Image: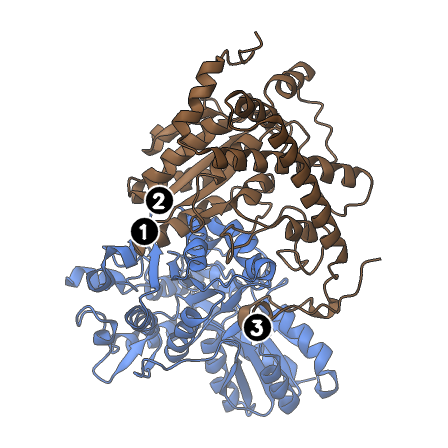
Chain colours: A brown, B blue
Amino acid sequence: MANTDTRTGRSEEDRRSAIEASGLKEEQLQEILYFLVLCRYFDERMETLYRQGRLPGAIYSGRGQEGTHVGVAYALRPEDSLFPTHRDLSAQLTKGLELKRIMAQFWGRIDGYTRGRDGNSHIGDWNGSRTFTVLSNLPNGYPVAAGAALAYQMRREPRVALAICGDGATSNGRWHESLNVSAIKKLPVVWVVNNNQWAYSTPNRLEFAVPTIAERGVGYGMPGVRVDGTEVLDVYTAATEAVERARNGDGPSLIESVSLRWKGHAGHDPAKYVPKEMLEDYVEHRDPVKKFAELLVMAGAIDQEGVKGIQERVEREFDEGFEFAQQSPLPDAGDVDLGVFTDDGYWEREPSREGGAPS
Amino acid sequence: MSDGDRERVGGDTPQASPTTAAEQAAKTEGDGGRAAAEAERAKKVEKDESEAGAAGHGAEPRGKRSDKGEATYLIAVAEALWEEMERDERVFMLGEDIGVYGGAFKVTEGFIDRFGPERVWDTPIMEETIVGMSIGAAMEGFRPVAEFQYADFMTCGFDEIVATAGKYTYRSGVPLPMVLRGPSGGGVRASAFHSQNPEPLFAHVGGLKVICPAFPTDAKGLLKSAIRDDNPVVFLEHKWIYRRIKEVVPDDPDFLIPIGKAEVKRAGDDVSIITYGAMVHRALEAAEDLEEQGISAEVVDLRTVYPLDVETILESVAKTSRALVLYESLKYLGIGSEVSAVIAEEAFEHLDAPVMRLAPPNHAVPFSPPLEDAFLPLTDDIVAAVDRLSKW
């Protein structure tokens, strides 16, 4: 049994062949592992700080879903755009957001991506890594992604927009509007549903009557695929196909990536609605980070020393980011009304760093 | 365009002709009522309109002006869109039935032939996504102009307007050059879902500029400014004005009216009537009646309702010492509520009387003519309100 995934029954050989199918080089595989480890470690440390009362605001854990996040974001080029949700920090880190600025954002500092205007994972970096600034209402990023894709199409640019939402947001009208119009216009967009099986406390069976979300793609006139979100390479390969299809002018695709949200909706939610046995099964046998590390070691793409090195690098980067965030000044209260419109030039200037040191 | 078409687009809505509705109102109410007076005024307007030279002199909006070079408000809006589309290839339009059909009110008639279906995009019925896609395209450097068939349907796209567009720049620094435009307002017998004035909803967001012009020249100059602005703008065209008001409109393709500036449309000494949209025309009518009574009324047209031109409002009140705030959005927490509060806070020492508001009651716009006439402030109501204000 040691060589077979207990849940999917996939053999070691089958999983090895996924490496080949991905077309990724060794250093890319190691980079994916780095992102998976980084995202997991970040999520765990931030939760600890939150529970210690050292982190203001809210946290929305994406633990257990890193395979989906890293897999889809790694399929994008720098010029492609990403439209994530509050649970998708792992995707944003993979797309290129800086850890230290993310942490400055969590602590409401001037070096955060929103200059303290918004908190937690409501992050974006449009002019840098081309990620949309997340908002709570979902799936608001879906129509916006369609609009960005329309822009690429109108300018005949070989670029792609990729939007992520959870299973919960698929019940909202905008999800359906966006898929519909993207197929009509053959927009260069990829629709990703991170199906973590619960919309806050509401399970899939109360959210939709069809067996899978993926098959809804057919109803809108686009391919839909369902992948195991705990297998990062399966996600990456599906996302790469969809991204290239979009880039080649062949229109949108829908990817349903299934995993489990290990933690509650937000830091305050103990998620008692998730059956204990199910959670244990996912944590023990379907951990996307652990599984991928084991696969790479097994395939000889990295050795134990290499894995240890990644872990050390991630811990060092987290500590540096934490220190950076603590040193970053608070926003200047006198700037509170600036930058509502572009007219006052607030966003074109470097912000005031006179907000004072945090207590 | 066939004669049949021309006749059909002559009304304010596909459903009703205002004149016959007003006449019907007179009949319903009997002799000498509010509606009868309204019907008389409507007849007068209808006569003027027939001289305006209806649409039909070719695709370009400017070709639709009267022989005297006058443009209706509707044609002025179309001219602004046409000129900005010609000027800047980043400008494109999206909306329901705007292309082949030319729009529910025919504002964009002929545009698809000149600019093509990509820049004049007939969308499915999906207001949330029309707004969301406008945001996405604006983030990527386009300058989308989305048409709503009626301003009432802006609430179908409300969440993307309020939660996404309205707060995006403040949270990200990313400019959103986009315009959401549509016909608002009542007085055309179109009832609860084709007559509303949603401007307070959008003015309350804080991150949207909201424009409600009353004259063709203002509509043209402000729409051009809105399209060139780097921020999201809600542009409300009052459908009662569309084909009723005409004037010679500037031809200069760079003629602009600045956003956020009110204008005194009629100078006076005794009382300030501060208003915007279709109510400007009622106020001007009332001012003429008042002059016969020896009361000199100043009419201030806000033009932009957010951000508000506080300076012009206060200057006028400082001069007249009396203020009637007239508005067509609902009275409770409408645009005039804010104007009144600003006057009370900033101009208290100038006032000889309390600030008075005249606006519709807080419920849906009713259909039947006597009901709608009771709902909307009519010219006689304005005269009566100023009379009361003058007696203080």
The CA span between labels 1 and 3 is 30 Å
Q: Nearer the viewer, residue A65 or A76?
A: A76
Is A34 situated above or below B189?
A: above
The CA span between labels 2 and 1 is 7 Å
Q: Which residue is mark 3?
A: A345
The residue at the point 58 percent across, 84 percent down is B312
Which badge, 3 or 2, is on the more N-terminal residue? 2
Residue placed furthest toward the top: A1
Mark 2–mark 1 contact, CB under 8 Å? yes
Is B220 situated above or below A332?
A: below
Image coordinates for residue B344, horizontal then vertical, percent: 71, 77
Is B312 situated above or below A195?
A: below
The residue at the point 62 percent across, 49 percent down is A122
Crowd around label 2: few <14 · some 14–19 · many ≥20 (10 Å):
many
The CA span between labels 3 and 2 is 33 Å
- Locate residue B149: give its quadrant: bottom left
Crowd around label 1: few <14 · some 14–19 · many ≥20 (10 Å):
many
Residue B366 at least partly seen: yes
Q: Secondary structure at mark 3?
A: loop
Image coordinates for residue A199, horizontal then vertical, percent: 59, 30
The residue at the point 54 percent across, 48 percent down is A96
Q: Which residue is mark 1?
A: A153
Q: Nearer the viewer, residue B71 or B323?
A: B71
Q: Secondary structure at mark 2?
A: loop
